[in-house]
Image (spheres, rainbow, N blue to C red):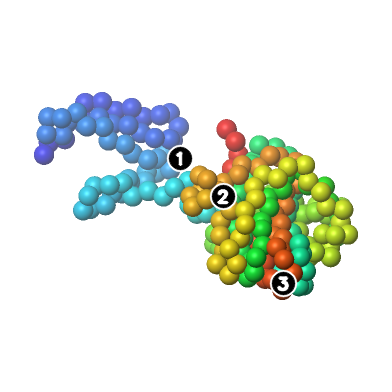
Amino acid sequence: MAFDSVETKEPSTGGTAFKTDLISAVHTQIVKLDGGAEGSSVPIKSDPATGALNTIDHAHHEIHSGSSFAVHIDNITASADNARTLLGFETPAGTKWAHLVVIASASAAAEVFLYEGVTIDDDEGTELTILDRNRNTANTSTMLSFEATPVAGQATWMTEAQVNTANFSATTILDHHILVAGAGPKPAGGNTRSTQEWVLAPSTKYAVVVQNIGASVNTHGITLDWYEHTDL
Protein backbone atom coordinates (compact mmCIF):
# COMPACT_ATOMS: atom_id res chain seq x y z
CA MET A 1 0.00 0.00 0.00
CA ALA A 2 1.63 3.23 -1.16
CA PHE A 3 1.14 6.61 0.48
CA ASP A 4 1.95 9.49 -1.87
CA SER A 5 1.06 12.86 -0.41
CA VAL A 6 -0.43 15.16 -3.02
CA GLU A 7 -1.97 17.95 -0.92
CA THR A 8 -1.82 19.25 2.62
CA LYS A 9 -3.97 21.97 4.16
CA GLU A 10 -3.01 23.23 7.61
CA PRO A 11 -4.92 25.97 9.44
CA SER A 12 -2.85 28.83 10.78
CA THR A 13 -3.81 28.20 14.39
CA GLY A 14 -4.79 24.77 15.69
CA GLY A 15 -8.10 23.24 14.63
CA THR A 16 -8.48 20.39 12.17
CA ALA A 17 -5.85 19.46 9.61
CA PHE A 18 -6.82 17.80 6.35
CA LYS A 19 -4.54 15.78 4.11
CA THR A 20 -5.30 13.98 0.86
CA ASP A 21 -3.12 10.96 0.08
CA LEU A 22 -2.97 8.43 -2.69
CA ILE A 23 -3.69 5.06 -1.10
CA SER A 24 -3.49 2.24 -3.64
CA ALA A 25 -4.08 4.81 -6.41
CA VAL A 26 -7.22 6.13 -4.70
CA HIS A 27 -7.41 9.71 -3.44
CA THR A 28 -8.22 9.37 0.26
CA GLN A 29 -8.82 12.21 2.69
CA ILE A 30 -7.11 11.81 6.04
CA VAL A 31 -8.38 13.87 8.97
CA LYS A 32 -6.17 14.77 11.92
CA LEU A 33 -7.68 16.25 15.07
CA ASP A 34 -5.52 18.98 16.55
CA GLY A 35 -5.87 19.64 20.26
CA GLY A 36 -5.23 23.36 19.69
CA ALA A 37 -1.53 23.65 20.36
CA GLU A 38 0.71 23.40 17.33
CA GLY A 39 1.90 19.84 16.84
CA SER A 40 -0.51 18.49 19.48
CA SER A 41 -2.70 16.00 17.63
CA VAL A 42 -5.26 13.42 18.75
CA PRO A 43 -5.62 10.33 16.55
CA ILE A 44 -9.06 9.23 15.41
CA LYS A 45 -9.69 5.73 16.79
CA SER A 46 -11.83 3.09 15.15
CA ASP A 47 -13.22 -0.32 15.99
CA PRO A 48 -10.68 -2.91 14.74
CA ALA A 49 -13.38 -5.36 13.61
CA THR A 50 -15.61 -3.03 11.58
CA GLY A 51 -13.61 0.17 11.08
CA ALA A 52 -16.42 2.20 12.69
CA LEU A 53 -15.28 5.39 14.41
CA ASN A 54 -15.23 5.39 18.20
CA THR A 55 -17.25 8.44 19.27
CA ILE A 56 -19.38 9.77 22.13
CA ASP A 57 -22.40 12.05 21.84
CA HIS A 58 -22.28 15.72 22.75
CA ALA A 59 -24.03 15.37 26.12
CA HIS A 60 -21.52 12.69 27.13
CA HIS A 61 -18.68 14.99 26.04
CA GLU A 62 -20.05 17.73 28.31
CA ILE A 63 -19.72 15.36 31.29
CA HIS A 64 -16.07 14.72 30.44
CA SER A 65 -15.40 18.45 30.02
CA GLY A 66 -16.80 19.25 33.47
CA SER A 67 -19.76 21.32 32.27
CA SER A 68 -22.53 18.82 33.11
CA PHE A 69 -24.34 19.10 36.44
CA ALA A 70 -27.04 17.42 38.53
CA VAL A 71 -29.06 17.96 41.68
CA HIS A 72 -31.42 15.49 43.39
CA ILE A 73 -33.95 15.35 46.21
CA ASP A 74 -36.07 12.58 47.80
CA ASN A 75 -39.02 13.63 49.95
CA ILE A 76 -41.65 11.61 51.82
CA THR A 77 -44.99 13.43 51.79
CA ALA A 78 -47.85 13.35 54.24
CA SER A 79 -50.91 11.30 53.31
CA ALA A 80 -52.60 14.15 51.49
CA ASP A 81 -54.04 14.64 48.02
CA ASN A 82 -52.02 17.16 45.93
CA ALA A 83 -49.08 17.16 48.36
CA ARG A 84 -46.08 18.55 46.47
CA THR A 85 -42.30 18.41 46.32
CA LEU A 86 -40.60 21.24 44.44
CA LEU A 87 -37.04 21.52 43.11
CA GLY A 88 -35.92 24.54 41.11
CA PHE A 89 -33.41 27.22 40.24
CA GLU A 90 -33.02 30.47 38.36
CA THR A 91 -30.97 30.63 35.17
CA PRO A 92 -28.37 33.42 34.89
CA ALA A 93 -28.28 36.15 32.26
CA GLY A 94 -26.18 35.64 29.13
CA THR A 95 -25.80 33.05 26.41
CA LYS A 96 -24.52 30.15 28.51
CA TRP A 97 -27.70 28.09 28.37
CA ALA A 98 -28.75 25.05 30.40
CA HIS A 99 -29.80 21.96 28.41
CA LEU A 100 -32.08 20.25 30.94
CA VAL A 101 -33.43 16.72 31.38
CA VAL A 102 -35.91 16.01 34.21
CA ILE A 103 -36.08 12.61 35.94
CA ALA A 104 -38.88 11.93 38.44
CA SER A 105 -40.29 9.05 40.48
CA ALA A 106 -42.98 8.36 43.06
CA SER A 107 -43.84 5.36 45.25
CA ALA A 108 -47.59 6.00 44.83
CA ALA A 109 -49.76 7.74 42.24
CA ALA A 110 -48.41 11.17 41.31
CA GLU A 111 -47.80 13.58 38.44
CA VAL A 112 -44.81 15.72 37.50
CA PHE A 113 -44.80 19.26 36.13
CA LEU A 114 -42.01 21.39 34.62
CA TYR A 115 -42.81 25.07 35.19
CA GLU A 116 -41.26 28.12 33.50
CA GLY A 117 -41.55 31.74 34.63
CA VAL A 118 -41.93 30.82 38.29
CA THR A 119 -42.89 33.43 40.86
CA ILE A 120 -41.99 32.35 44.39
CA ASP A 121 -41.00 34.03 47.63
CA ASP A 122 -37.29 34.09 48.42
CA ASP A 123 -35.73 32.19 51.31
CA GLU A 124 -38.67 29.81 51.82
CA GLY A 125 -36.98 26.54 50.92
CA THR A 126 -33.79 24.58 51.54
CA GLU A 127 -30.71 24.98 49.38
CA LEU A 128 -28.95 22.05 47.75
CA THR A 129 -25.44 22.00 46.29
CA ILE A 130 -25.40 21.32 42.55
CA LEU A 131 -22.87 18.60 41.70
CA ASP A 132 -20.38 18.54 38.84
CA ARG A 133 -20.95 15.18 37.12
CA ASN A 134 -17.23 14.86 36.41
CA ARG A 135 -15.98 14.18 39.92
CA ASN A 136 -12.40 14.88 38.83
CA THR A 137 -13.14 18.57 38.26
CA ALA A 138 -14.41 21.19 40.65
CA ASN A 139 -16.54 23.39 38.42
CA THR A 140 -19.48 25.39 39.76
CA SER A 141 -22.79 25.55 37.95
CA THR A 142 -24.06 29.00 36.97
CA MET A 143 -27.62 28.17 38.12
CA LEU A 144 -28.94 30.23 41.04
CA SER A 145 -30.93 29.45 44.20
CA PHE A 146 -34.30 30.99 45.11
CA GLU A 147 -32.85 33.37 47.69
CA ALA A 148 -32.89 37.13 48.26
CA THR A 149 -29.18 36.95 47.48
CA PRO A 150 -29.07 34.11 44.94
CA VAL A 151 -26.11 31.73 45.19
CA ALA A 152 -24.54 30.22 42.07
CA GLY A 153 -24.12 26.46 42.20
CA GLN A 154 -27.19 25.89 44.38
CA ALA A 155 -30.80 24.89 43.76
CA THR A 156 -33.78 25.19 46.12
CA TRP A 157 -36.22 22.48 47.17
CA MET A 158 -39.50 22.77 49.12
CA THR A 159 -42.00 20.58 50.91
CA GLU A 160 -45.76 21.06 50.49
CA ALA A 161 -45.86 23.31 53.57
CA GLN A 162 -43.08 25.51 52.19
CA VAL A 163 -44.60 25.68 48.68
CA ASN A 164 -47.96 26.58 50.22
CA THR A 165 -46.55 29.60 52.08
CA ALA A 166 -44.17 30.76 49.31
CA ASN A 167 -46.90 32.17 47.01
CA PHE A 168 -45.85 29.84 44.21
CA SER A 169 -47.17 30.45 40.69
CA ALA A 170 -45.89 30.05 37.14
CA THR A 171 -46.68 31.48 33.73
CA THR A 172 -46.07 28.31 31.68
CA ILE A 173 -46.32 24.54 32.11
CA LEU A 174 -43.64 23.23 29.75
CA ASP A 175 -44.23 19.56 30.46
CA HIS A 176 -46.59 17.31 32.44
CA HIS A 177 -46.63 13.53 32.92
CA ILE A 178 -48.36 10.97 35.10
CA LEU A 179 -45.85 8.88 37.05
CA VAL A 180 -46.30 5.13 37.35
CA ALA A 181 -46.35 4.33 41.05
CA GLY A 182 -43.28 2.42 42.21
CA ALA A 183 -41.86 2.11 38.68
CA GLY A 184 -38.58 3.84 39.48
CA PRO A 185 -37.10 7.07 38.10
CA LYS A 186 -38.51 8.10 34.71
CA PRO A 187 -37.20 10.78 32.36
CA ALA A 188 -39.99 13.24 31.62
CA GLY A 189 -40.69 13.59 27.91
CA GLY A 190 -39.53 10.40 26.19
CA ASN A 191 -36.92 7.70 25.88
CA THR A 192 -34.16 9.68 24.14
CA ARG A 193 -32.42 12.90 25.07
CA SER A 194 -33.74 14.59 21.92
CA THR A 195 -37.30 14.16 23.23
CA GLN A 196 -36.44 14.91 26.89
CA GLU A 197 -34.18 17.96 26.65
CA TRP A 198 -35.26 21.55 27.25
CA VAL A 199 -32.92 24.45 26.43
CA LEU A 200 -33.73 26.96 29.16
CA ALA A 201 -34.08 30.71 28.70
CA PRO A 202 -31.73 33.07 30.56
CA SER A 203 -32.78 35.06 33.65
CA THR A 204 -35.79 32.80 34.26
CA LYS A 205 -36.96 30.76 37.23
CA TYR A 206 -37.79 27.09 36.63
CA ALA A 207 -39.27 24.49 38.96
CA VAL A 208 -40.10 20.80 38.77
CA VAL A 209 -43.00 19.73 40.99
CA VAL A 210 -44.09 16.18 41.81
CA GLN A 211 -47.67 16.18 43.13
CA ASN A 212 -49.72 13.41 44.75
CA ILE A 213 -52.79 12.00 43.05
CA GLY A 214 -54.92 10.90 45.98
CA ALA A 215 -54.17 10.83 49.69
CA SER A 216 -51.24 8.53 50.40
CA VAL A 217 -47.81 8.70 51.96
CA ASN A 218 -45.61 9.07 48.90
CA THR A 219 -41.87 9.16 48.29
CA HIS A 220 -41.12 11.71 45.59
CA GLY A 221 -37.79 11.71 43.76
CA ILE A 222 -36.61 14.52 41.47
CA THR A 223 -33.32 14.71 39.58
CA LEU A 224 -32.40 17.67 37.38
CA ASP A 225 -29.62 16.81 34.93
CA TRP A 226 -28.18 19.40 32.55
CA TYR A 227 -25.12 20.70 30.81
CA GLU A 228 -24.20 24.35 30.32
CA HIS A 229 -23.10 25.42 26.86
CA THR A 230 -22.47 28.90 25.44
CA ASP A 231 -24.67 29.48 22.42
CA LEU A 232 -22.72 30.29 19.24
Residue bearing mark 1:
36
Query: Mark 3 or 2 closer to N-term?
Result: 2
Residue plotted at (50% across, 44% down)? 194
Q: Position of residue 221 (x, y in %)?
A: 65, 65
Instruction: Name the amino acid type tagged 2.
Output: Gly
Q: Position of residue 14 (x, y in %)?
A: 44, 35
Tag 1 near tag 2, CB within 8 Å:
no
Q: Is residue 89 above or below residue 18?
A: below
Residue bearing mark 3:
216
Give the CA separation, mark 1 to mark 2.
38 Å
Viewer-nearest residue: 136 or 201: 201
Say the numbered circle drawn on residue 20.
none
Q: Is residue 6 above or below residue 43?
A: above
Instruction: Name the amino acid type tagged 3.
Output: Ser
Q: Is residue 224 visible?
A: no
Q: Position of residue 22 (x, y in %)?
A: 17, 30
- With 183 as the anchor, is 110 left or right in this view? right
Viewer-nearest residue: 99 or 181: 181
Give the CA separation, mark 3 to mark 2.
25 Å
Say the numbered circle drawn on residue 189.
2
Q: Secondary structure at mark 2?
A: loop
Instruction: Name the amino acid type tagged 1.
Output: Gly
Tag 3 near tag 2, CB within 8 Å:
no
Nearest-to-viewer mark from 1 and 2? 2
Give the CA separation, mark 3 to mark 1.
57 Å
Q: Position of residue 78 (x, y in %)?
A: 77, 72
**In the rendered image, which quarter contains the N terminus?**
top left
- With 184 as the anchor, is 12 left or right in this view? left
Viewer-nearest residue: 140 or 83: 83
